[in-house]
Amino acid sequence: MFSIIIPTYNRNDSFNMALKSIKENFDDSIDKIIIIDDGSKIPIKETIDYHGMNKNKFKLIRTKNKGPAHSRNMGIKNAKSKYLIFLDDDCTLGKNFIKNLKKVVKSNKSLNIIESHFLDPNKNNVYNLAWHLNYLYRLNKAMGYKGKGKYVNFLGNCYIIKNKMFNKIGLFDERFRTREDADFVIRAYKKSIPIVLFYDLKIKHNSRSHLFAILKQFYGYGVGQVILNKKWGDYANKIFYFNILDFLNYLKDYNNIHKIKYALVIRNIGYQVGIIAQLLKSFQLRKSLNEFLNILLHIKKVYVG
């Protein structure tokens, strides 16, 4: 019934934590665990811990470093199950994930794309806390309607997708090094395919926890956003628009609001610098200047209002 696809790159430790969570959820409904090593410096096959699972259930693929879109596509091409579970190498399955997923697909046979609910296990770190609160805010503002424990057309990641959907939507666009999931969501929307989130399908996200990692991560998002905007224009901005003042109002009663503001500014600096770098590659100097001004405007909005 299920194939689990895990792209991984230079995260051998967190990758093995992901496998441990699969072991804790393992049952006969899992047909295959497909691991795509995207050119890690230390090959995954040298450090993998199967946690006692049958090695015949695994398929290891090693490629040159081409990014997560290429890795996911390699997994899709090697998967034969009805449903594909996409698990990032810095995420772990929550308790009873597979058990709950079987209930979901049994009672929602018409659904083609299912979304898991993210938890952040390290909310004591200000960067992780900002990320998690941002996620909860987006969940609160999700497109569609809130029904019986689920949101329709929520914008998140770690999807469960029917294999046949890739014939209709297409594979992940390998031009993206980041934001490939956002591009896929847009294509699903364009074809009126709902994405439904279920709270019982919990994923723990071991998000970045120090300054350089946050800057690097959001720099990559900024680079990807330029490509996304070039491909989809205003439609991408409409779907993924984020109102910083509305978000801060959402957090107005939160105790650590000043720390959250700091973390948001750091994230946005990385994001905008990524956009500027990508624009400069194509000699778009005026747009680059506008993005620099956006950094200053963002700081003003956060701290002045």
Image (spheres, rainbow, N blue to C red):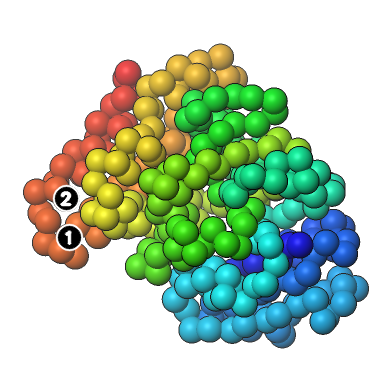
Q: Residue at x 64, y 24 (%)?
A: 147
Disc 1 and disc 2 in contact, CB within 8 angstroms: yes
- Check disc 1 and report its element: helix, strand or loop: helix
Residue 149 location in percent, x, y?
70, 28
Q: Is residue 120 visible?
A: no
Please, is residue 10 above or below residue 22 in the view?
A: below
* Residue sitting at x 70%, y 84%: 45
Q: Amino acid at mark 2?
A: Ser
Report whether 251 appears left or right of 49: left
The answer to whether residue 195 is seen in the rendering is yes
- The residue most toward the front is 110
Q: Is residue 118 left or right of residue 156?
A: right
Alpha carbon separation for disc pair 1 and 2: 7 Å
- Residue tagged 1: 280
In the picture, measured across the screen, residue 178 lies left or right of residue 272, that is right
Q: Position of residue 180 (x, y in %)?
A: 43, 58
Give the camera-side residue of 262 and 129. 129
Q: Which residue is mark 2?
A: 288
Helix or strand or loop: what does disc 2 sit on? helix
